[in-house]
Amino acid sequence: MMTKQPVPSLIIKLGIPTMISMFVTTIYNMADSYFVGQINTSASGATGVVLGLMAILQAVGFMFGHGSGSIISRKLGQKDIESARKFSATGFYSALFAGFFFLIFGSLFLTPLMTLLGSTPTILPYAKTYGICILCAAPALVSSCVMNNILRYEGRAFFAMIGLTSGGILNIFLDAIFMQKMGMGIFGAGLATAISQYVSWILLLTMFILKKTQTSLNIKYAKFNISTLGDIITTGLPSLARQGLASISTMVLNNAAGVYGDAAIAAMSIANRVTMFIFSAVLGIGQGFQPIAGFNFGAKKYSRVRQGFFFTLFFGTLLLGCASVAVLLNAGSCIQIFRDDPEVIAIGIPALQAQCVALFFVPFQVCNNMMFQSIGYKFNATFLSSLRNGLYFIPVILIFSALWGLTGIQLSQAVADVLTSFTCIPFTVTFFAKLPKEEPEDGV
Protein backbone atom coordinates (compact mmCIF):
# COMPACT_ATOMS: atom_id res chain seq x y z
CA MET A 1 0.00 0.00 0.00
CA MET A 2 2.70 2.49 1.01
CA THR A 3 4.83 2.01 -2.12
CA LYS A 4 2.32 0.96 -4.80
CA GLN A 5 -1.01 2.72 -4.22
CA PRO A 6 -1.37 6.06 -6.06
CA VAL A 7 -0.03 8.82 -3.82
CA PRO A 8 -3.04 11.21 -3.92
CA SER A 9 -5.55 8.53 -2.91
CA LEU A 10 -3.15 7.20 -0.27
CA ILE A 11 -2.69 10.66 1.29
CA ILE A 12 -6.46 11.15 1.41
CA LYS A 13 -6.95 7.63 2.84
CA LEU A 14 -4.44 8.28 5.64
CA GLY A 15 -5.15 12.00 5.99
CA ILE A 16 -8.93 11.97 6.35
CA PRO A 17 -8.98 9.88 9.58
CA THR A 18 -6.18 12.05 10.98
CA MET A 19 -8.01 15.20 9.95
CA ILE A 20 -11.18 13.96 11.65
CA SER A 21 -9.13 13.20 14.78
CA MET A 22 -7.66 16.71 14.71
CA PHE A 23 -11.11 18.26 14.21
CA VAL A 24 -12.62 16.35 17.11
CA THR A 25 -9.65 17.14 19.36
CA THR A 26 -9.96 20.82 18.51
CA ILE A 27 -13.74 20.72 18.89
CA TYR A 28 -13.59 19.36 22.42
CA ASN A 29 -11.01 22.02 23.32
CA MET A 30 -13.43 24.57 21.87
CA ALA A 31 -16.27 22.94 23.82
CA ASP A 32 -14.34 23.60 27.01
CA SER A 33 -14.00 27.24 25.95
CA TYR A 34 -17.71 27.42 25.14
CA PHE A 35 -18.96 26.00 28.44
CA VAL A 36 -16.37 27.80 30.56
CA GLY A 37 -17.11 31.04 28.72
CA GLN A 38 -20.62 30.95 30.17
CA ILE A 39 -19.18 31.38 33.69
CA ASN A 40 -17.42 34.74 33.23
CA THR A 41 -14.59 36.42 31.31
CA SER A 42 -11.92 35.48 33.88
CA ALA A 43 -12.84 31.80 33.60
CA SER A 44 -12.73 32.08 29.83
CA GLY A 45 -9.24 33.57 30.11
CA ALA A 46 -8.18 30.60 32.28
CA THR A 47 -8.67 28.19 29.36
CA GLY A 48 -6.18 30.27 27.39
CA VAL A 49 -3.68 30.14 30.25
CA VAL A 50 -3.96 26.36 30.70
CA LEU A 51 -3.61 25.99 26.95
CA GLY A 52 0.07 26.80 27.54
CA LEU A 53 0.33 23.88 29.98
CA MET A 54 -1.29 21.51 27.50
CA ALA A 55 1.17 22.70 24.86
CA ILE A 56 4.06 21.72 27.15
CA LEU A 57 2.63 18.24 27.67
CA GLN A 58 1.94 17.82 23.96
CA ALA A 59 5.44 19.05 23.13
CA VAL A 60 7.00 16.18 25.07
CA GLY A 61 4.43 13.69 23.78
CA PHE A 62 4.95 14.69 20.17
CA MET A 63 8.72 14.63 20.62
CA PHE A 64 8.58 10.96 21.61
CA GLY A 65 5.71 10.23 19.22
CA HIS A 66 7.02 11.86 16.06
CA GLY A 67 10.59 10.88 16.95
CA SER A 68 9.83 7.18 17.30
CA GLY A 69 7.17 7.22 14.56
CA SER A 70 9.45 8.76 11.94
CA ILE A 71 12.14 6.16 12.64
CA ILE A 72 9.56 3.35 12.66
CA SER A 73 8.20 4.29 9.23
CA ARG A 74 11.71 4.20 7.73
CA LYS A 75 12.54 0.92 9.49
CA LEU A 76 9.36 -0.65 8.15
CA GLY A 77 10.24 0.68 4.69
CA GLN A 78 13.55 -1.19 5.09
CA LYS A 79 11.62 -4.27 6.41
CA ASP A 80 13.42 -4.08 9.78
CA ILE A 81 10.46 -4.89 12.06
CA GLU A 82 12.57 -5.81 15.09
CA SER A 83 14.15 -2.35 15.21
CA ALA A 84 10.73 -0.74 14.71
CA ARG A 85 9.43 -2.54 17.81
CA LYS A 86 12.41 -1.34 19.82
CA PHE A 87 11.65 2.28 19.00
CA SER A 88 7.90 1.95 19.59
CA ALA A 89 8.28 0.46 23.08
CA THR A 90 11.05 2.85 24.09
CA GLY A 91 9.11 5.90 22.91
CA PHE A 92 5.92 4.83 24.70
CA TYR A 93 7.44 4.13 28.12
CA SER A 94 9.64 7.24 27.98
CA ALA A 95 6.53 9.35 27.40
CA LEU A 96 4.62 7.60 30.17
CA PHE A 97 7.42 8.30 32.69
CA ALA A 98 7.58 11.92 31.53
CA GLY A 99 3.82 12.28 32.10
CA PHE A 100 4.16 11.16 35.73
CA PHE A 101 7.05 13.61 36.16
CA PHE A 102 4.83 16.50 35.05
CA LEU A 103 2.00 15.31 37.29
CA ILE A 104 4.17 15.28 40.42
CA PHE A 105 6.20 18.45 39.94
CA GLY A 106 3.43 20.46 38.28
CA SER A 107 1.14 19.78 41.24
CA LEU A 108 3.82 20.84 43.73
CA PHE A 109 4.40 24.18 41.98
CA LEU A 110 0.91 24.84 40.64
CA THR A 111 0.56 28.49 41.66
CA PRO A 112 3.89 29.74 40.26
CA LEU A 113 3.31 27.65 37.13
CA MET A 114 -0.08 29.23 36.41
CA THR A 115 1.33 32.69 37.13
CA LEU A 116 4.23 32.06 34.75
CA LEU A 117 1.78 30.96 32.05
CA GLY A 118 0.10 34.37 32.23
CA SER A 119 -2.61 34.24 34.92
CA THR A 120 -3.79 37.56 36.29
CA PRO A 121 -4.90 37.64 39.96
CA THR A 122 -8.55 37.29 38.88
CA ILE A 123 -7.84 34.43 36.45
CA LEU A 124 -5.51 32.49 38.81
CA PRO A 125 -8.17 30.63 40.90
CA TYR A 126 -9.86 29.32 37.75
CA ALA A 127 -6.54 28.44 36.11
CA LYS A 128 -5.38 26.44 39.16
CA THR A 129 -8.61 24.43 39.29
CA TYR A 130 -8.53 23.67 35.56
CA GLY A 131 -4.77 23.13 35.55
CA ILE A 132 -4.69 20.47 38.30
CA CYS A 133 -7.15 18.36 36.27
CA ILE A 134 -4.93 18.60 33.20
CA LEU A 135 -1.89 17.61 35.25
CA CYS A 136 -3.74 14.52 36.54
CA ALA A 137 -4.29 13.54 32.91
CA ALA A 138 -0.62 14.15 31.96
CA PRO A 139 0.52 10.48 31.87
CA ALA A 140 -2.32 9.57 29.51
CA LEU A 141 -2.05 12.74 27.42
CA VAL A 142 1.71 12.45 26.83
CA SER A 143 1.83 8.71 26.11
CA SER A 144 -1.30 8.86 23.91
CA CYS A 145 0.63 11.16 21.59
CA VAL A 146 3.14 8.33 21.09
CA MET A 147 0.55 5.63 20.41
CA ASN A 148 -1.37 7.89 18.06
CA ASN A 149 1.72 8.72 16.03
CA ILE A 150 2.98 5.13 15.89
CA LEU A 151 -0.38 4.05 14.48
CA ARG A 152 -0.29 6.84 11.91
CA TYR A 153 3.28 6.15 10.82
CA GLU A 154 2.37 2.48 10.36
CA GLY A 155 -0.45 3.54 8.05
CA ARG A 156 -3.11 2.66 10.70
CA ALA A 157 -4.63 6.14 10.83
CA PHE A 158 -8.15 4.71 11.18
CA PHE A 159 -7.25 3.02 14.48
CA ALA A 160 -5.71 6.26 15.75
CA MET A 161 -8.89 8.10 14.79
CA ILE A 162 -11.07 5.71 16.82
CA GLY A 163 -9.07 6.35 19.99
CA LEU A 164 -8.91 10.13 19.68
CA THR A 165 -12.44 10.81 18.43
CA SER A 166 -14.07 8.58 21.05
CA GLY A 167 -12.36 10.50 23.85
CA GLY A 168 -13.14 13.83 22.21
CA ILE A 169 -16.85 13.12 21.81
CA LEU A 170 -17.02 11.85 25.39
CA ASN A 171 -15.39 15.11 26.55
CA ILE A 172 -18.15 17.19 24.97
CA PHE A 173 -20.91 15.15 26.61
CA LEU A 174 -19.19 15.21 29.99
CA ASP A 175 -18.74 18.99 29.71
CA ALA A 176 -22.50 19.36 29.31
CA ILE A 177 -23.27 16.96 32.17
CA PHE A 178 -20.71 18.22 34.69
CA MET A 179 -21.12 21.92 34.01
CA GLN A 180 -24.74 22.43 32.98
CA LYS A 181 -26.53 19.57 34.74
CA MET A 182 -24.38 19.23 37.87
CA GLY A 183 -23.18 22.84 38.17
CA MET A 184 -19.52 21.87 38.73
CA GLY A 185 -18.13 24.99 37.01
CA ILE A 186 -14.62 25.03 35.62
CA PHE A 187 -13.70 21.96 37.69
CA GLY A 188 -16.30 20.05 35.66
CA ALA A 189 -14.59 21.10 32.43
CA GLY A 190 -11.20 19.97 33.72
CA LEU A 191 -12.59 16.68 35.06
CA ALA A 192 -14.29 15.98 31.72
CA THR A 193 -11.01 16.51 29.89
CA ALA A 194 -9.07 14.27 32.28
CA ILE A 195 -11.56 11.39 32.06
CA SER A 196 -11.68 11.66 28.27
CA GLN A 197 -7.89 11.54 28.01
CA TYR A 198 -7.77 8.26 29.92
CA VAL A 199 -10.57 6.77 27.81
CA SER A 200 -8.63 7.65 24.63
CA TRP A 201 -5.48 6.17 26.17
CA ILE A 202 -7.22 2.85 26.88
CA LEU A 203 -8.69 2.64 23.38
CA LEU A 204 -5.35 3.38 21.71
CA LEU A 205 -3.57 0.86 23.93
CA THR A 206 -6.15 -1.77 22.99
CA MET A 207 -5.00 -1.59 19.35
CA PHE A 208 -1.55 -2.75 20.41
CA ILE A 209 -2.83 -5.36 22.85
CA LEU A 210 -5.00 -6.88 20.09
CA LYS A 211 -1.89 -6.96 17.84
CA LYS A 212 -3.38 -4.73 15.15
CA THR A 213 0.11 -3.34 14.51
CA GLN A 214 3.52 -4.56 13.35
CA THR A 215 5.15 -2.74 16.25
CA SER A 216 4.71 -3.58 19.93
CA LEU A 217 4.60 -1.84 23.30
CA ASN A 218 5.87 -4.89 25.18
CA ILE A 219 8.36 -3.71 27.82
CA LYS A 220 10.84 -6.37 26.68
CA TYR A 221 11.50 -4.36 23.49
CA ALA A 222 12.28 -1.10 25.31
CA LYS A 223 15.92 -0.03 25.24
CA PHE A 224 16.65 2.96 27.47
CA ASN A 225 20.18 3.54 26.18
CA ILE A 226 21.80 6.66 24.81
CA SER A 227 21.70 5.43 21.22
CA THR A 228 17.99 4.57 21.08
CA LEU A 229 16.75 7.47 23.20
CA GLY A 230 19.12 9.84 21.41
CA ASP A 231 17.71 8.86 18.00
CA ILE A 232 14.12 9.32 19.20
CA ILE A 233 14.76 12.66 20.88
CA THR A 234 16.83 14.20 18.07
CA THR A 235 14.31 13.06 15.46
CA GLY A 236 11.49 14.41 17.60
CA LEU A 237 13.17 17.74 18.31
CA PRO A 238 11.16 19.57 15.62
CA SER A 239 7.95 18.62 17.45
CA LEU A 240 9.43 19.61 20.81
CA ALA A 241 10.53 22.92 19.35
CA ARG A 242 7.20 23.53 17.66
CA GLN A 243 4.98 22.65 20.62
CA GLY A 244 7.39 23.87 23.30
CA LEU A 245 7.66 27.24 21.66
CA ALA A 246 3.88 27.24 21.31
CA SER A 247 3.71 27.06 25.10
CA ILE A 248 6.23 29.86 25.51
CA SER A 249 4.46 31.98 22.92
CA THR A 250 1.14 31.42 24.70
CA MET A 251 2.77 32.59 27.92
CA VAL A 252 4.21 35.69 26.19
CA LEU A 253 0.87 36.38 24.50
CA ASN A 254 -1.09 36.11 27.77
CA ASN A 255 1.33 38.39 29.58
CA ALA A 256 1.26 40.94 26.77
CA ALA A 257 -2.54 40.83 26.47
CA GLY A 258 -2.97 40.86 30.26
CA VAL A 259 -1.93 44.53 30.28
CA TYR A 260 -5.29 45.23 28.60
CA GLY A 261 -7.35 43.12 31.01
CA ASP A 262 -8.97 39.69 31.20
CA ALA A 263 -11.07 40.47 28.12
CA ALA A 264 -7.93 40.73 25.96
CA ILE A 265 -6.61 37.37 27.19
CA ALA A 266 -10.01 35.74 26.60
CA ALA A 267 -10.33 37.29 23.11
CA MET A 268 -6.88 36.17 21.94
CA SER A 269 -7.46 32.71 23.39
CA ILE A 270 -10.74 32.33 21.51
CA ALA A 271 -9.26 33.67 18.26
CA ASN A 272 -6.40 31.18 18.50
CA ARG A 273 -8.75 28.26 19.19
CA VAL A 274 -10.92 29.12 16.18
CA THR A 275 -7.82 29.42 14.01
CA MET A 276 -6.57 26.08 15.32
CA PHE A 277 -9.83 24.49 14.24
CA ILE A 278 -9.26 25.67 10.67
CA PHE A 279 -5.57 24.77 10.89
CA SER A 280 -6.58 21.19 11.79
CA ALA A 281 -7.56 20.56 8.17
CA VAL A 282 -4.10 21.07 6.71
CA LEU A 283 -2.42 19.55 9.77
CA GLY A 284 -4.48 16.38 9.34
CA ILE A 285 -3.64 16.07 5.66
CA GLY A 286 0.00 16.86 6.42
CA GLN A 287 0.13 14.10 9.00
CA GLY A 288 -1.40 11.75 6.43
CA PHE A 289 1.57 12.60 4.20
CA GLN A 290 4.14 11.88 6.92
CA PRO A 291 4.14 8.04 6.87
CA ILE A 292 4.18 8.11 3.06
CA ALA A 293 7.21 10.41 3.04
CA GLY A 294 9.11 8.39 5.66
CA PHE A 295 8.27 4.94 4.28
CA ASN A 296 9.05 5.80 0.64
CA PHE A 297 12.19 7.72 1.52
CA GLY A 298 13.38 4.65 3.43
CA ALA A 299 12.47 2.48 0.42
CA LYS A 300 14.31 4.94 -1.90
CA LYS A 301 11.15 5.74 -3.86
CA TYR A 302 11.92 9.43 -4.08
CA SER A 303 9.44 10.35 -6.81
CA ARG A 304 6.59 9.39 -4.48
CA VAL A 305 7.99 11.72 -1.81
CA ARG A 306 8.02 14.58 -4.32
CA GLN A 307 4.54 13.80 -5.61
CA GLY A 308 3.17 13.56 -2.08
CA PHE A 309 4.60 16.94 -1.08
CA PHE A 310 3.00 18.86 -3.92
CA PHE A 311 -0.35 17.08 -3.69
CA THR A 312 -0.49 17.79 0.05
CA LEU A 313 0.39 21.44 -0.59
CA PHE A 314 -2.33 21.85 -3.23
CA PHE A 315 -5.05 19.97 -1.34
CA GLY A 316 -4.19 21.61 2.00
CA THR A 317 -4.25 25.11 0.50
CA LEU A 318 -7.64 24.43 -1.09
CA LEU A 319 -9.16 23.19 2.18
CA LEU A 320 -7.65 25.89 4.31
CA GLY A 321 -8.52 28.63 1.85
CA CYS A 322 -12.23 27.77 1.80
CA ALA A 323 -12.41 27.52 5.60
CA SER A 324 -10.45 30.74 6.12
CA VAL A 325 -12.73 32.77 3.88
CA ALA A 326 -15.83 31.45 5.65
CA VAL A 327 -14.47 32.36 9.10
CA LEU A 328 -13.10 35.71 7.89
CA LEU A 329 -16.58 36.77 6.78
CA ASN A 330 -18.14 35.68 10.07
CA ALA A 331 -15.41 36.56 12.58
CA GLY A 332 -17.69 38.35 15.03
CA SER A 333 -20.18 35.49 15.18
CA CYS A 334 -17.36 32.99 15.76
CA ILE A 335 -16.05 34.97 18.74
CA GLN A 336 -19.52 35.53 20.15
CA ILE A 337 -20.23 31.79 20.33
CA PHE A 338 -17.60 31.41 23.02
CA ARG A 339 -18.04 34.65 24.97
CA ASP A 340 -20.90 37.08 24.42
CA ASP A 341 -19.00 40.04 25.83
CA PRO A 342 -18.82 43.19 23.64
CA GLU A 343 -15.25 43.93 24.74
CA VAL A 344 -14.07 40.37 24.02
CA ILE A 345 -15.76 40.42 20.60
CA ALA A 346 -14.29 43.82 19.68
CA ILE A 347 -10.75 42.68 20.52
CA GLY A 348 -11.12 39.23 18.97
CA ILE A 349 -12.46 40.21 15.54
CA PRO A 350 -9.30 41.95 14.15
CA ALA A 351 -7.05 39.21 15.54
CA LEU A 352 -9.13 36.43 13.97
CA GLN A 353 -9.43 38.23 10.63
CA ALA A 354 -5.68 38.82 10.40
CA GLN A 355 -4.96 35.16 11.18
CA CYS A 356 -7.46 33.99 8.56
CA VAL A 357 -5.64 35.97 5.87
CA ALA A 358 -2.26 34.60 6.97
CA LEU A 359 -3.54 31.00 7.00
CA PHE A 360 -3.18 30.92 3.19
CA PHE A 361 0.60 30.81 3.79
CA VAL A 362 0.46 28.00 6.36
CA PRO A 363 0.12 24.84 4.17
CA PHE A 364 3.55 25.44 2.63
CA GLN A 365 5.30 25.55 6.01
CA VAL A 366 3.34 22.52 7.27
CA CYS A 367 4.36 20.44 4.24
CA ASN A 368 8.00 21.34 4.79
CA ASN A 369 7.93 20.53 8.49
CA MET A 370 6.16 17.21 7.98
CA MET A 371 8.41 16.09 5.15
CA PHE A 372 11.76 16.98 6.69
CA GLN A 373 10.87 15.39 10.03
CA SER A 374 9.57 12.20 8.39
CA ILE A 375 12.66 11.63 6.27
CA GLY A 376 15.12 12.36 9.10
CA TYR A 377 16.38 15.82 8.06
CA LYS A 378 16.63 16.86 11.69
CA PHE A 379 18.22 20.32 11.35
CA ASN A 380 15.84 21.51 8.61
CA ALA A 381 12.80 20.23 10.49
CA THR A 382 13.85 21.62 13.86
CA PHE A 383 14.77 25.05 12.54
CA LEU A 384 11.65 25.51 10.41
CA SER A 385 9.31 24.25 13.12
CA SER A 386 10.83 26.76 15.55
CA LEU A 387 9.87 29.77 13.47
CA ARG A 388 6.07 30.10 13.60
CA ASN A 389 5.57 29.98 17.35
CA GLY A 390 9.03 31.01 18.49
CA LEU A 391 11.87 32.55 16.53
CA TYR A 392 9.49 34.84 14.65
CA PHE A 393 6.40 35.11 16.84
CA ILE A 394 8.05 36.01 20.16
CA PRO A 395 10.20 38.91 18.81
CA VAL A 396 7.29 40.10 16.64
CA ILE A 397 4.79 40.26 19.51
CA LEU A 398 7.29 41.97 21.83
CA ILE A 399 8.18 44.60 19.21
CA PHE A 400 4.65 45.08 17.83
CA SER A 401 3.05 45.39 21.28
CA ALA A 402 5.64 47.99 22.25
CA LEU A 403 5.05 49.97 19.03
CA TRP A 404 1.29 49.60 18.47
CA GLY A 405 -0.12 48.24 21.72
CA LEU A 406 -3.15 45.97 21.42
CA THR A 407 -3.23 46.27 17.63
CA GLY A 408 0.31 44.92 17.47
CA ILE A 409 -0.71 41.93 19.60
CA GLN A 410 -3.65 41.22 17.28
CA LEU A 411 -1.40 41.19 14.19
CA SER A 412 1.59 39.30 15.59
CA GLN A 413 0.59 35.70 14.75
CA ALA A 414 -0.36 36.63 11.19
CA VAL A 415 2.97 38.37 10.57
CA ALA A 416 4.87 35.39 12.03
CA ASP A 417 3.00 33.01 9.69
CA VAL A 418 3.92 35.00 6.58
CA LEU A 419 7.59 35.31 7.56
CA THR A 420 7.81 31.58 8.31
CA SER A 421 6.46 30.58 4.91
CA PHE A 422 8.91 32.78 3.03
CA THR A 423 11.79 31.36 5.08
CA CYS A 424 10.81 27.81 4.01
CA ILE A 425 11.32 28.56 0.29
CA PRO A 426 15.12 28.09 0.02
CA PHE A 427 14.96 24.86 2.05
CA THR A 428 12.29 23.43 -0.27
CA VAL A 429 14.06 24.45 -3.48
CA THR A 430 17.40 23.07 -2.34
CA PHE A 431 15.94 19.74 -1.21
CA PHE A 432 14.04 19.00 -4.40
CA ALA A 433 16.94 20.14 -6.57
CA LYS A 434 19.14 17.47 -4.94
CA LEU A 435 16.49 14.73 -4.73
CA PRO A 436 16.83 12.09 -7.51
CA LYS A 437 14.21 12.39 -10.23
CA GLU A 438 13.29 8.71 -10.11
CA GLU A 439 13.88 5.99 -7.51
CA PRO A 440 16.82 3.71 -8.45
CA GLU A 441 16.15 0.10 -9.45
CA ASP A 442 17.34 -2.75 -7.21
CA GLY A 443 21.01 -3.45 -7.73
CA VAL A 444 21.71 -0.15 -9.47
Image (spheres, grey):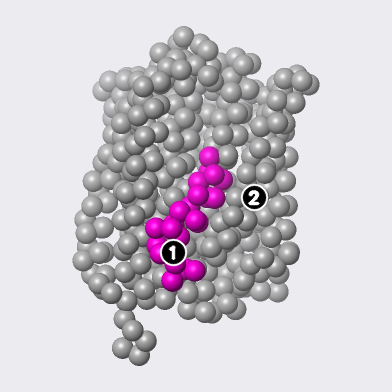
Marks 2/1: CA distance? 21 Å
Query: Can you tell which quarter of the image residue 9 is in?
Result: bottom left
Amino acid carrying mark 2 in the image: Ile
Counting residues from the N terminus, which is met first, the one under dot 2 or under dot 1?
Answer: 2
- SS of the residue under disc 2: helix
Q: Can residue 254 be seen in this view?
A: no
Q: Nearer the viewer, residue 46 or 279?
A: 279
Q: Seen in the image, is 314 located left or right of residue 235?
A: left
Q: Which residue of the protein is positioned furthest toward the top in this rendering?
A: 342
Circle 1 packing at 10 Å, graded few (<14), some (14-19), many (20+), is many
User: Residues in magenta?
Assistant: 1-23
Instruction: Judge whether 420 appears above or below 183 on screen.
Output: below
Residue at the spot 70% in from the left edge and 68% down from the top edge: 211
Residue 412, x across and y down, in percent: 33, 30
Q: Main secondary structure of the magenta part?
A: helix
Residue at the spot 53% in from the left edge and 53% down from the top edge: 62
Circle 2 packing at 10 Å, graded few (<14), some (14-19), many (20+), is some
Would you name the residue on which mark 2 appears?
A: 162
Q: Seen in the image, is 172 located left or right of residue 154?
A: right
Residue 123, x across and y down, in percent: 58, 21
Residue at the spot 52% in from the left edge and 74% down from the top edge: 76
Asked whether 371 falls inside the magenta stretch, the response is no
Would you name the residue on which mark 1 appears?
A: 292
Residue at the spot 44% in from the left edge and 71% down from the top edge: 3
Asked whether 12 falls inside the magenta stretch, the response is yes
Residue 414, x across and y down, in percent: 32, 33
Residue 386, x across and y down, in percent: 37, 48
Q: Which of 111 and 405 is in front in this view?
A: 405
Q: Seen in the image, is 64 located left or right of residue 431?
A: right
Amino acid carrying mark 1 in the image: Ile
Q: Which residue of the protein is positioned furthest toward the bottom in this rendering?
A: 443
Instruction: Judge whether 47 appears above or below 164 on screen.
Output: above
